[in-house]
Image: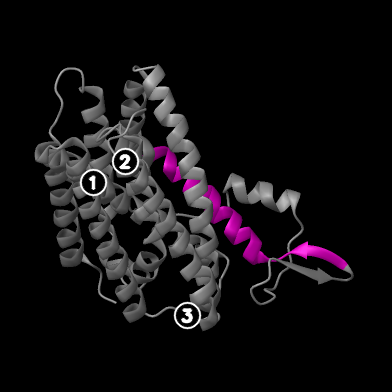
Amino acid sequence: MASVAPLWLWLVFVAFVLIALFVDFVVLKKQGAHAVGVKEALNWSLVWVGLSLVFNALFWWAVKDTTGSTEVANEKALEFLTGYLIEKSLSVDNIFVFLMIFTYFAVPPNFQKRVLMIGIIGAIVLRTVMILVGGWLLAQFHWILYVFGGFLILTGVKMWFGAGGEDSLDDNPALKLLRKVLPVSKEYDGEKFWTVENGVKIATPLLMVVALVAMTDVIFAVDSIPAIFAITKDPFIVLTSNVFAILGLRAMFFLLQAAASRFHLLNYGLAIILVFIGTKMMIIDLYKIPVTVSLGVVMGILAITMIWSSKTAPNT
């Protein structure tokens, strides 16, 4: 699938991702294992959002310079912003599942940072592959768009009726499979994924957590990637908006971790967003909903749901 982004911007994007991962794994590693506070999480969240907006401005300039059209540049930049917001909002659901996993395995706060760092790399690799495959399918088979749309609508309906229910990992098939395949120690051994008990090398609970986090992201990517294809079919926009949303996922996790109870109704809003995007895909050959309308709907639903959640939040 063709993209309006010039080659040099692809290279800038790749370089930025590599630098971001280097900072995460090398520079920030010197801080050691520690619990991330709200202030630190808020600062990093603002940094990632700011960098995403700066990149979008660079993308706008590159498109305008390449096409010579301000109108095209505005449209593509708006597609990136809408896609980024959708991916960011849908990633909130990931965070609630991550919270459940960390609680279930009683992951110490100072170990959670490393788990999410590794999960982010896995998410970038897996989503890149899924985006390329999804883009190829759409280019070859237009009717796949209707399959994606119907899937999103069904997922949204399921999410609506499942919102507010009690979640549990006890019957999670992925967890059961992992426990059958790998012997796991009962205790953590620092940040190690493997330990030795009675002379036998076995996995630590931290490895189980990383595996579940990776599996969770794959499952949620099945929802989020079709959602952004409803906004644009440009592979550059699909990939970059996904990756920028993922890079800020760790900071957003720690930020929402402290305020999870205040957004207890957010899943209802996410369900409506999925149904809206699925409907947009289903009727695309009859009427193409403008990107500005999509952006307004997504922002409006998120704002209403968050305000509604804050007003009805249980007293703690």
Residue sticking out furthest to the right: 199
Q: Where is residue 300 in the image (x, y as percent from the top left)?
A: 13, 50
Task: Specify the quadrant that holds the N terminus.
Answer: top left
**In magenta stretch: residue 80:** no
Frontmost residue, 70 versus 229: 70
Callout in the foreground (3, 1) = 1
Marks 3 and 2, the one that precedes in the sequence:
2
Callout in the foreground (3, 2) = 2
Characterize the magenta stretch by its predominant secondary structure.
helix
Q: Residue at x 43, y 64 (%)?
A: 20
Mark 2 = which residue?
A: 6
Q: Which residue is drawn at 54% across and 69% down?
A: 114
What amino acid type is highlighted by mark number 1?
A: Ala
Residue 62's disc number: 1
Disc 3, disc 2: CB below 8 Å?
Answer: no
Q: Is mark 3 on a helix, strand or loop?
A: loop
Disc 3, disc 1: CB below 8 Å?
Answer: no
What amino acid type is highlighted by mark number 3?
A: Ala
